[in-house]
Image (cartoon, grey):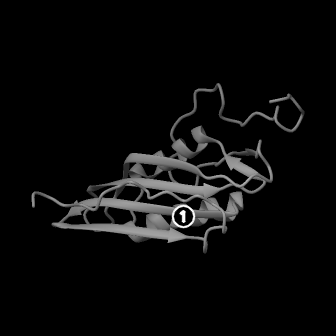
Amino acid sequence: MESTPENDQKPAFLGKDTPLPRSPEQAQLDYVPNPRKGALYLVRFAAPEFTSLCPVTDQPDFAHLVIDYAPGDTIVESKSLKLFLGSFRNHNGFHEDVTVGIGQRLADEMKPRWLRIGGYWYPRGGIPIDVFWQTGAPPADLWVPDQGVASYRGRG
């Protein structure tokens, strides 16, 4: 890709030792200009070892998150997303609130053409909880593959 002032912009976190934010509210998400502005394509982030804390027991809850989005003018910088997701390790929240909150924050700040998040939570008390949220219908010509995470089957 040709170097221009627009694509030479470097996110604040790149090349720096960056501590994990203490909370999702303190986490800063970085966005950079979409290098393929105008093209319709899908970006997928998978976080198979996501954790947050149960607001009732303070015990860790584990999930496999899958975030799909069709970029608009910007894309999220992956290190800042990793730090943002890591900031939930000490955050108390119900599965629904955590999953939808992550999707809404990304959608509000990044303004993608379309975004969806799937939160595949591991069982607590014998009940797995899967949470799904999206900004609306995907664009007509966007290829949207299955998220590829099997429903929890346990031993049966």
Front-most of residues 104 and 17: 104
Residue at the spot 70% in from the left edge and 63% down from the top edge: 113
* Residue furthest right in the image: 5
Image position of 106 with respect to 48: above or below: below
User: Badge 1: few (under 14), some or many (20 or more) residues near its Cα, within 10 Å?
Assistant: many
Indicate the position of residue 111 as horizontal and vertical percent values: 71, 62
Compare residues 28 and 44 and report the one nearer the observer: 44
Taking 27 as reference, is 151 above or below it?
A: below
Horizontal arrangement in the rendering, residue 111 relative to residue 156 (left or right): right
Residue 110: x and y, percent?
A: 70, 57
For the N terminus, give its image quadrant: top right
Q: Which residue is mark 1?
A: 116
The vertical placement of 135 against 142, above or below, is below
Q: The disc labelled 1 sits on which kind of residue?
A: Arg
Image position of 69 (left or right of 23): right
Could you tell me residue 2's position as x and y percent?
Answer: 85, 29
For the C terminus, which image quadrant? Answer: bottom left
Using the rendered view, name the quadrant where residue 10 is placed.
top right
Left or right for 146, reference 55 = right
Q: Position of residue 87 (x, y in %)?
A: 48, 48
